[in-house]
Amino acid sequence: MLDILVGILVMLVKMALVLAVVFGLAAYMILLERKLLGRMQVRYGPNRVGLFGLLQPIADGLKMLLKEDIIPDGVDRRIFLVAPAIVAGTALFAFAVVPFGPDFTAFGVTVRQVIADANVGVLIVFGLSSLAVYGVALGGWTSDNKYSLLGGLRGAAQMISYELALALSLVPVVMLSRSLSLSDIVAAQARLPFALVQPVAFAIFIVSSLAETNRIPFDLPEAENELQAGYHTEYSGMRFALFFVGEYVNMILLGSITAVFFLGGWHGPFLPPIVWFLIKVLAVPVFLIWTRASLPRLRYDQLMAVGWKFLVPLGLVNILVTGAILAAGM
């Protein structure tokens, strides 16, 4: 009985720590993006609230809390209220199977640095990412706004299309690690990260992830010059903030699964494992910010053509080549 209570307590502590770290990183990722974009565009980012603008995320959070939550006439109220939570919630749930470091012992108790080490962790991540499309589609559909509806339809088509290429890019990783557990995939990269072993899969994964997170050059569901703000045009206050924070939580999740699948997880010389993991996780959002500052937005037909006519066939060929090499090696 005592072991069960200790196990539950450890899991609750891990959940609280993960939530605190993820929300803290998401808040300051917004500040980092504004600072980096400012420097790349030869201007200052936020620098008035606190030393170097470090209190800006807190000020923004208070501003969103104090703004009026407007619900337009003609919307399906229940779905309208729930849609933002689906986008943020599915990303948060996915962190349950992400391993952050190797096991360690504290006070005689072996602690695993993962909330739930499922042996089908890859499928759980994909299942939850598939649910995120409902938040975008329902938020656009239920807003009773043509721009929002178009943004929701674009988002659904884009996320479903690029999810296929994303899945195909991870099949060689599963083939090489011979496991669907995220911990086993990290362990298989102890000597060499899969980004070097599978550069084609890594490239497909990064491009597909950009589209999955609706980031420039793939931000067609919320293209302001075409759709005002797309699927979240009618949202305000904390419900808009949930969509906004959900995007940055997704960026951190993308950094985490990129580190796990392709960058060797927590493996690295000299520094503690958790430090290596955080460096690799944060490198991905910085790359996303860099692409936002550098690349123009694609047309919608170009976006869909890249996914279906290039990435999906390339992913299938990469799987066949990987399978042939493994079969020859056996």
Image (cartoon, rainbow, N blue to C red):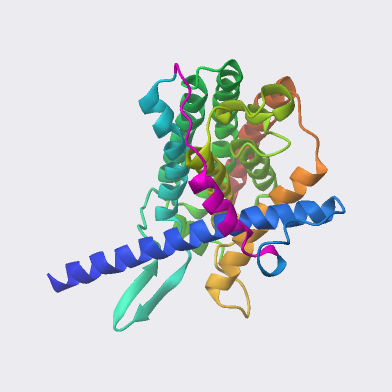
Q: Which residues are magenta?
A: 53-74
Q: Residue at x 38, y 62 (%)?
A: 16
Q: Residue furthest right?
A: 42
Number of marks in the rendered image: 0
Q: Residue at x 61, y 59 (%)?
A: 28
Residue closer to the observer: 195 or 108: 108
Q: Position of residue 108 (x, y in %)?
A: 29, 83
Can residue 235 be seen in the rendering of this structure?
Answer: yes
Can residue 286 be seen in the rendering of this structure?
Answer: no
Within the image, what quadrant is residue 230 found in? top right
Residue closer to the observer: 103 or 232: 232
Say if the magenta span includes residue 143: no
Within the image, what quadrant is residue 234 found in? top right
Q: Position of residue 224 (x, y in %)?
A: 70, 29
Q: Position of residue 300 (x, y in %)?
A: 71, 22
Q: Residue at x 24, y 64 (%)?
A: 8
User: Is residue 116 depicted above or below 147 in this figure?
Assistant: below
Q: Residue furthest bottom?
A: 107
User: Is residue 264 depicted above or below 130 in this figure?
Assistant: below
Q: Position of residue 269 (x, y in %)?
A: 63, 77
User: Is residue 187 depicted above or below 178 in this figure?
Assistant: below
Residue closer to the observer: 208 or 313: 208
Q: Residue at x 58, y 62 (%)?
A: 264
Q: Residue furthest left?
A: 1
Location of the N terminus by quadrant is: bottom left
